[in-house]
Image (spheres, rainbow, N blue to C red):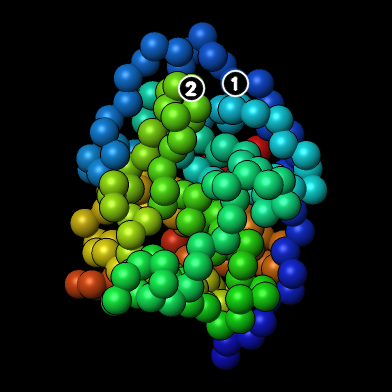
Amino acid sequence: MIRRAKPLASAAAAVALAVAALLTGCGIDPAGIQDTSVVEAGLPATITTIPEQHGLVVYFVNARGRLTPVVKPGPFDGDEATHAPETGAESGGADGAGSTGSTDERYTFPVNLVLHMLFRGPTQADRAAGLGTRLPADASNHSTELTFDDDKVSLVLGFPVKPLSETARQQIVCTISRHTAELMPKTVVLSGPGGRTEPDVCRAPAL
């Protein structure tokens, strides 16, 4: 039975200092390249200091191929990157690409927002810190639909999910899980053209 999620609390406090010496100057794989290595968790990379009440967390990949949580500005910081994605055809052309559907936007807004940030990929500052992504370069151009069931979160994407690497899937799963953990521990199911994934959980630590 689908139910409304309670309003989510804001994400974690200011993120710890990055290991800049470890990441500076290290190259990363281009966005969209599949990674078949075992998912490893990396130390948090810091791009900026975000107030606790506004911070949102997305998972990128560091130069060593490890999942890395990154705190981003929240929706009230006046940053263009934090604005909610528009819904419907206006945000993605005639077919509605880029739109975001859900059971109730009042409750799913925080998760939709961080997914929008994740799919847009690392910013210039993120990449300068050695962060990359394993998600398709055009991920933000596709529609998404997010629903909450009693024990799982389901995300329908406009691009195939089965060809995604384990690391890419975990980027999505961990970003969702980070913002639904206060409701209850949930599994995440990803689906798209051509099939769906088995229910999965985040295997990377929080900040």
- Compared with residue 168, is residue 131 higher up or lower down, i.e. above or below? above
Q: Quadrant of residue 37?
A: top left
Residue at the image position 49 percent from the left and 57 percent from the top: 115
Q: Toward the viewer: 81 or 117?
A: 81
Of label 1 and label 2, which has the lower sequence position? 1
Question: Residue 129, which numbered label?
Answer: 2
Other-residue count near label 2 (Cα within 10 Å), few / some / many at <14 / 14–19 / ≥20: many
Residue at the image position 57 percent from the left and 47 percent from the top: 80
Q: Quadrant of residue 130?
A: top left
Query: How far across and how far down the image is residue 178, in percent?
Result: 61, 53
- Side of 180 where 201 appears, left or right: left
**Does the CB distance between marks 1 and 2 fall below 8 Å?**
yes
- Compared with residue 25, is residue 160 higher up or lower down, i.e. above or below? below
> Circle 1 is placed at which residue position?
18
Query: How far across and how far down the image is residue 1, in percent?
Result: 57, 90
Q: Quadrant of the C terminus?
A: top right
Q: Looking at the image, is mark 1 or mark 2 nearer the viewer?
A: 2
Query: How far across and how far down the image is residue 124, in percent?
Result: 44, 29
- Separation (CA) of disc 1 from disc 2: 8 Å
Residue at the image position 67 percent from the left and 75 percent from the top: 106
Query: How far across and how far down the image is residue 125, in percent?
Result: 50, 27
- Compared with residue 161, is residue 1 higher up or lower down, i.e. above or below? below
Q: Toward the viewer: 189 or 138?
A: 138
Under mark 2, the amino acid is Ala
Residue at the image position 41 percent from the left and 67 percent from the top: 91
Under mark 1, the amino acid is Ala
